[in-house]
Image (tube, coloured by chain):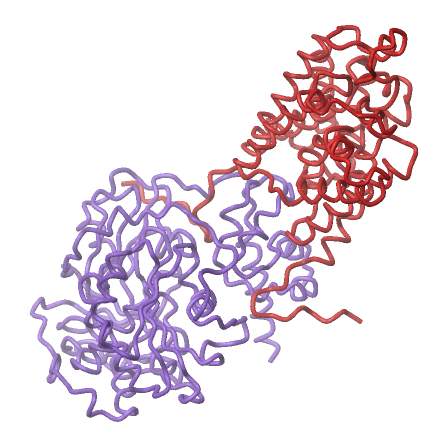
Amino acid sequence: MGKSTFLGGIHPYEGKKLTMDKPTTVLLPKGDLVFPMSQHIGAPAKPIVAVGDHVLVGQKIGEAGGFISSNIISSVSGSVKAIEKRLVVSGKLEESIVIENDHEYKTVEGYGTKRDYTKMSKDEIRGAVKEAGIVGLGGAGFPTNVKLAPKDENAIDFVVVNGAECEPYLTSDYRMMMEEPEKIVGGLKIMLRLFDHAKGIIAIEDNKPEAIEKFKQLTSSEERIEVQALKTKYPQGGERQLVYVTTGRKLNSKKLPADVGCVVDNVATVAAIYMAVARCTPLTNRIVTISGDAVSNPQNFNVPIGTDFGEIVEAAGGFKAQPEKIVFGGPMMGMAMYTYHIPVTKITSSLVSFLQDEAAVEESPCIRCGRCLEHCPLQLAPVQLAKAAAHNDEEGFVSMDGLECCGCGCCSYVCPAKIGLTQKIMQTRNQILANRKKAK
Amino acid sequence: MNDLFHVSAAPHARSPITTRNIMQDVVIALLPASLFGIYNFGIRALSVILTTILACTVTEYVYCRLMKKQVNPADYSDVVTGLLLALNLPVSIPLWMAALGGVFAILIVKMLYGGLGQNFMNPALAARVFLLISFPGQMTNFAVEKISSPTALDYINNGAVAVVDSVSGVTPLAAVKAGETVDLFRMFVGNHAGTIGETSALALLLGAGYLLYRKVISLRIPLTYIVSVVIFALLFGGHGLDANYLLGQVLGGGLILGAFYMATDYVTSPASHKGQIIYGIFLGVLTGIFRIVGKSVEGVSYAIVIGNLVVPLIDKVTRPVSFGKERAKVEK
């Protein structure tokens, strides 16, 4: 079932060896913790505590602000110092709750109790996921409880666990797969309880053979679960490419995986589902990779959400030399920032630092080599889209399927003339979508 | 620590391959054919090569200065055009004529249409066609002063077996066309008359192999082009399955030079895989028509130049269907 690989894609420098074989260390923050109210797709959460309140680990401090939204959970015990705008990873200032850590880590009642999920109803399971504030931990941050409640649950025949981790340098998912695989399998089994007709596929890129082996052993007696090795190629972990290679079904920008009978979730999200449902543990921590050639000791840390990234940099031995660029996320789709003093949120998976900025090169004229067409995983014509974008030709852009672009960056990566194709296309695409929204 | 970082939009990684790398690879790939040309035709070949390269480079430089445009730091594209042009000229061409070709290639075909990436025809080939039409005599004079191979006159006068060398056109191909048996091995190695770079299939294939290995070109265009010529010659050549005839068609007339180095020029060839195959077949059929149905022995240059004009249309028709979408219905 499925395909061996998708058309297009690239093989960038993987950078995984810097961190993949080091065990994850728990890092406890020394300073204050900052919880932005928006760490997910959808409406921001609303604070439900006031300055001066005492909070516990696992306590809800932000209530979901709508149907597509998520709760914010405190990861430490302490007192609410302030509720004010703070800088977040996107460069925006978001309303945030600042908590002063009392370093005691007292938990709410019932935190960590084992629970038999086989005795829970589907709604109870979804409710637990919602309460725990779980969102897509792969980086998109879509509220998981909404994803787990598609229009027709009986039409779902595949639950795909995304263990591809195709971005270079990132290994947080890999470390979780190596260190806590039972949680991932457990989470998948819980999800399969929600979708009676579904089969589970744990999909892992083949540059992680030990993880594949581990999961094959763990699921050998599970009838509804299969492990699939994926050919390593960026962006194999992208939703459209993943669904295509595991199930053979094609998506486009207007379709969700649920429209083709699939539910896809990142391995960390699935593990969080297990912890919330079977161990009454809401989403308080995440594994963060700090890597790149500028940091002294690249490695993975398990940190409470809300920790300042500055502490992670310090714990990794600081920078060997001033990096030219720091990126949150991976080098292909991550966000470059002008400071690393921002809080860890549910969706910040990594900090990658570069001594030299590869992208700081002059553009030269397009020589029509066709590499961008060849490597686009969605078979678009990036050079023609960028031309339409430069000429403000909205009609041409849309007719050439510019709105399909997922921003993976393969075209900019391969272009020998170093033209900023992705940037031009994404800017125009986002502008068109924003204008359409305004017009409604 | 000074907290100043670069901030730019994703992606932040770039492939190490640059335009300059690609151009340099093409120059390297053309070295075997160039060196063989100098060996076969003498030191004058080197003068022609240097003249055209100089003409191309200076033309672009002067144009950019006059038009107050930024001069591209040495991206080797002019060297490639100059070299390709030289390899398409006979060694005896007056140097001023070669320089004129270089100026035409860069100024008219490339710069006036927008510079790098905007030429509507292959500049080197367009210049060759320009020279062919303007100075047919000198452009088809393949008599050589350095004798490594006898001239046609020797053969005709002394009654030797007419293997190579003729008076006009691309030499061995004329013999092929006339239905004579040709020495394929000699055509393969290349020590016979012709333009500076087209004689040695061996040298050209070595260079082509390098380009394929470096992933600068793919086999799609050259292979479909050459195979189409063979099939056309098979069907319409009048010699049926005569291997000597068919291979003579392949090894002669600058087909290998054209198929691997000129038809594969990025700017003037289709972007999609399907488009490239259509283009190869189109070129093959056109070359076949010129060579077999037409009187001229000159097929490749005109075929490619005409093919270049059709490429935008091919591109429009063969744009790939986006992932997950249906092929768009024909617009009203």
Reply above or below: B180 against B270.
Answer: above
Q: Is residue A390 visible?
A: yes
Residue A81, by quadrant, is bottom left
Question: Which colour denotes chain B?
Answer: red
Residue B164, by quadrant, is top right
Q: Quadrant of the N terminus of chain B?
A: top left
Residue at 66%, 21% (x, y): give it: B189
| Viewer-nearest residue: A208 or A42 | A208
Question: Which colour denotes chain A?
Answer: purple
Residue at 19%, 62% (x, y): give it: A303
Residue B184 in picture, x, y percent from top left = 71, 25
Reply above or below: A407 against B164.
Answer: below
Reply above or below: B16 against B97.
Answer: below
Viewed as shown, does residue A423 lie left or right of A326?
right
Reply above or below: A68 against A359.
Answer: below
Residue B46 in picture, x, y percent from top left = 69, 12
